[in-house]
Amino acid sequence: YMTNKVVAIQGNHPSKLKPLTDTSIFLAVEAQRLKYKIFYYEPKDLSIINDKVIAKGYYVEFNYSDKRFFKILHNQKLELTKCKYILIRQDPPFNLEYISTTYILDKIKNKVKIINNPTSIRNISEKLYSTSFQKYMPNTIFTKDMKEINKFFSKNKKMIIKPIHSFSGNDIHLFQNKINTKLITSFIKKHGHIMCQKFLPKIKFGDKRVFIINGKVCGAISRVPKKGSFLSNMSKGAIPISVKLTKIENKISNIVGKNLKKNDIYFSGIDFIDQKLNGDINVTSPTGLKSFYDLTNINLAKVFWKGLKA
């Protein structure tokens, strides 16, 4: 292949992806339309050999109309500086393997455009980064200190706790009448520092996911939890609906968007509940573009690739 027409995707194995909602496939299909070949590899298959960054992977073709939505064309070891773009798209958790891959890709980020910049995603912890915007958020603390957590709970009456480095609604607990010290203690033991946040009951009407591409607010969807749940993740059964941003949400999104662009984050997703930033700033592998397209017929993958050319 003319290698400068290759987009490499670092992600979870394609068989683990759900084509109906997956953003990586959606971006890949648009890249194929632009005549790029897709080279796909998993984080574990990234190496530095003789001072070159090499990935062991395969060329793959995605096709929504096939029952099996991807076809592996052939296996390949590819020196990644030969690509035009690399997309970092594996799921968090943001663990040591994730961090190691960002260090490896740092080596070549001046030779090939990597989305998002590996240095930036390493520096921007999706939850802790939001502390720069705390005035737009519900009451939130980050701590391992049980005393502080008790104090926070008695002040806020209802709170949720979540790990700082998890994803998609995993390990989120709600406390509303009393606090379960034993659960929280073992939770801290497992996760280290945790995020405690005042619970916003309006979550039952849905959150809003805002898509930010190259610093610009490009659209939003709302995700409405299934009955009896407070989790607005589609992986937890929430239903996406089309939505407009309020003035306040738009203003905050623009502030965050400018800040992310300054930090060299090209593509991100931020979330609101009840017009408040919920403090998850998705920079590692933002999602939702396919659902947005299904709801609005607006293809943000086109905006994504066009912006990189500019």
Image (cartoon, rainbow, N blue to C red):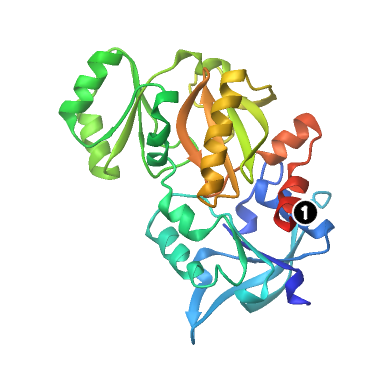
Residue farthest toward the left in the current orientation of the protein: 147
305 vs 82: above or below: above
In the structure shown, which secondary structural element does the residue marked by tag 1 occupy?
A: helix
At x 64%, y 22%, the residue is 245
Quadrant of the rendered structure where residue 180 is?
top left
The location of residue 160, given as percent across then percent down, is 36, 25
Q: Position of residue 269 (x, y in %)?
A: 57, 39
> Is residue 236 shown left or right of residue 61?
left
Q: Residue furthest bottom?
A: 50
Question: In which quadrant is the N terminus drawn?
Answer: bottom right
Q: Is residue 253 above or below residue 44?
A: above
Q: Position of residue 291 (x, y in %)?
A: 70, 35
Within-10-Å neighbours for mark 1: few <14, some 14–19, many 20+: many
- For the question of whether residue 291 can be seen, the reply is yes
**Residue under pointer 1:** 29
Considering only vertical position in the picture, is 237 above or below 115? above
Mark yes or no: residue 178 visible.
Answer: no
Residue 166 is situated, as x and y percent measured from the top left of the image, at 41, 43
Q: Nearer the viewer, residue 250 or 46?
A: 250
